[in-house]
Image (tube, rainbow, N blue to C red):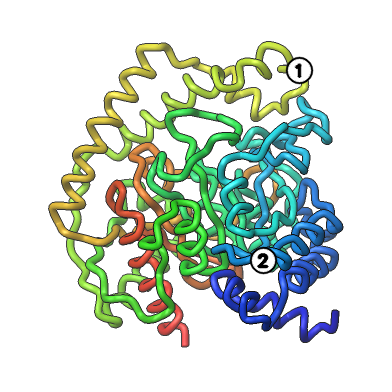
């Protein structure tokens, strides 16, 4: 494919592809081939893919060209390797399972997008069991730097334009943080609103299916199809100015100056574009909620991974082993107390958010730029509380830090207000873009 044609096809927003294909302006095969060509060029230096078979993706694309309609007709999607696929191996990022481990069926989310006409490009690298032990994926801008995790390969693949959309998951900060580090948009919906049947469990009370895309409107398109709710989609037209609360959090000092400046700059840009900014008081003990999140994980991870812990602990990587056999271990009482604290906090937070009538909180998405090296995927301190509270979160790119790597902000909405949160995030994304010229 000529370079210009490749660039043109990859540049088409995912949300516009089905209409372009239906109109005969392009085909699912041409779009898939363009992304496969990009993978062939970029993948050796990034290592975002755990498994992909170009011929298989092209065969699926030919089926889409021969079929009628579909809300995601011909849209290529990358699937994180903790999410089951019936025709591609799923090894959960671990040597416990053979590289050719083959689930008998698709996860619900994969089946839904295939039913809507999407094309599965392949499986992306995950940290082991979506915990913290990194895989081989490099940052798409700077080799030798983490892309974040646990949705490492998915974020890197979207940022490097090897896929327009990708599935992630989040138990702490595994979708929002890699999106922030890689300079793309990421969405962690309200807990339970997107089905995670067929997704490897890490902590049942926290695990959430996440989505990654190049911009917020593509995220909303992806989410609307999965939720079967057109109201989640965000039109390309400008959004009504939202009512936002800047929340620096009690752990603001753990944000680098670049991240702090990103939040302040995004607030200023949104205000100039017409958004209303209001004050917000923390209705709970943020630090206590961080501790509750930790207690939930220390109790639930060893049980979710009981088979691997009891039969294959010697094969598990050291950092993952630390989650499977935590020191100190949580007791059943610790777990119940943490779940109780979280349930009470969810009521308080939603009363506070709805009482102010705000569309979203504007807050840091990550401590700053992606940290150097591949030994760690970064700190989830700005994500864990929102995951515990079950609130919808959107990462929005907000420029670059002093090291030249992306920084981002995060929009957090009230429980179940995913459509409102996505719309507010799209407004902020537009305002940031205008402020940068």
Which labelled disc corresponds to residue 421? none
Give the side of residue 161 with respect to residue 241, left or right: right
Give the residue at mark 2. 74
Q: Quadrant of the N terminus?
A: bottom right
Label 2 or label 1, whichever comes before in sequence order: 2
Give the side of residue 357 with respect to residue 391, left or right: left
Distance in Å between CA atoms under marks 2 and 1: 43 Å
Q: Which residue lies at the image location 40% right of the left edge and 41% below the top edge?
A: 191
Visible residue check, residue 240: yes
Q: Position of residue 137 (x, y in %)?
A: 73, 51
**Crowding at label 2, few (<14), some or many (≥20) Cα neighbours within 10 Å?**
many
Q: Position of residue 428 (x, y in %)?
A: 37, 72
Give the side of residue 251 with respect to residue 196, left or right: left
Residue 83, above or below 42: above
Q: Along the line of sight, which residue is nearer the eye, 14 or 29?
A: 29
Q: Position of residue 179 (x, y in %)?
A: 55, 58
Tag nearer the camera, 2 or 1: 2
Q: Along the line of sight, which residue is nearer the eye, 366 or 393?
A: 393
Q: Along the line of sight, which residue is nearer the eye, 398 or 234?
A: 234
Give the residue at mark 1. 314
Q: Position of residue 176 (x, y in %)?
A: 50, 53
Visible residue check, residue 159: no
Q: Along the line of sight, which residue is nearer the eye, 373 or 227?
A: 227
Q: Secondary structure at mark 2?
A: loop
Residue 104 placement: quadrant? top right
**Crowding at label 1, few (<14), some or many (≥20) Cα neighbours within 10 Å?**
few
Tag 2 and tag 1, C-beta contact below 8 Å: no
Q: Which residue lies at the image location 26% right of the left edge and 70% below the top edge?
A: 242
Return the residue found at the far left.
Answer: 355
Q: Secondary structure at mark 1?
A: loop
Q: Which residue lies at the image location 33% right of the left edge and 34% below the top edge?
A: 289
Residue 227, above or below 275: above
């Amino acid at each position: 494919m000529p370079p210009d044609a490749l660039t043109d096809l990859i540049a088409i927003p995912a949300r516009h592809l089905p209409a372009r294909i239906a109109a005969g302006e392009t085909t699912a095969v041409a779009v898939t081939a363009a992304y496969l060509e990009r993978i062939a060029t970029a993948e050796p230096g990034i290592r975002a893919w755990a498994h992909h078979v170009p011929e298989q993706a092209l065969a699926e694309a030919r089926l889409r060209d021969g079929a009628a309609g579909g809300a995601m007709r011909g849209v290529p999607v990358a699937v994180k390797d903790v999410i089951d696929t019936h025709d591609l191996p799923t090894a959960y990022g671990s040597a416990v399972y053979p590289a050719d481990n083959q689930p008998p069926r698709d996860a619900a989310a994969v089946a839904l997008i295939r039913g809507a006409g999407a094309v599965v490009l392949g499986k992306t690298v995950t940290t082991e069991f979506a915990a913290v032990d990194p895989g081989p994926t490099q940052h798409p801008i700077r080799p030798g730097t983490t892309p974040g995790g646990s949705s490492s390969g998915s974020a890197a693949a979207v940022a490097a334009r090897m896929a327009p959309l990708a599935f992630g998951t989040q138990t702490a900060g595994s979708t929002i943080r890699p999106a922030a580090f890689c300079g793309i948009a990421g969405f962690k919906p309200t807990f339970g609103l997107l089905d995670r049947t067929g997704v490897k469990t890490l902590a049942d009370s926290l695990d959430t299916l996440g989505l990654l895309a190049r911009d917020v409107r593509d995220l909303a398109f992806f989410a609307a199809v999965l939720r079967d709710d057109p109201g989640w989609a965000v039109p390309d037209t400008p959004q009504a100015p939202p009512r936002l609360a800047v929340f620096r959090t009690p752990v603001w000092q753990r944000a680098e100056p670049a991240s702090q400046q990103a939040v302040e700059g995004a607030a200023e840009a949104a205000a100039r574009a017409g958004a209303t900014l209001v004050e917000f008081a923390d209705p709970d003990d943020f630090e206590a909620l961080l501790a509750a999140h930790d207690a939930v994980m220390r109790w639930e991870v060893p049980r979710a991974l009981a088979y691997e812990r009891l039969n294959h602990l010697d094969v598990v990587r050291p950092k993952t082993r630390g989650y499977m056999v935590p020191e100190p271990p949580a007791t059943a009482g610790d777990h119940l107390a943490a779940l109780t604290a979280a349930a009470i906090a969810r009521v308080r937070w939603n009363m506070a958010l709805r009482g102010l009538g705000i569309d979203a909180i504007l807050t840091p998405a990550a401590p700053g730029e992606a940290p150097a090296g591949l030994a760690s995927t970064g700190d989830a301190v700005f994500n864990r509380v929102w995951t515990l509270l079950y609130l919808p979160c959107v990462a929005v790119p907000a420029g670059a830090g002093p090291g030249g790597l992306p920084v981002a902000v995060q929009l957090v909405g009230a429980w179940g207000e995913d459509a409102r949160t996505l719309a507010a995030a799209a407004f902020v994304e537009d305002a940031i873009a205008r402020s940068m010229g």
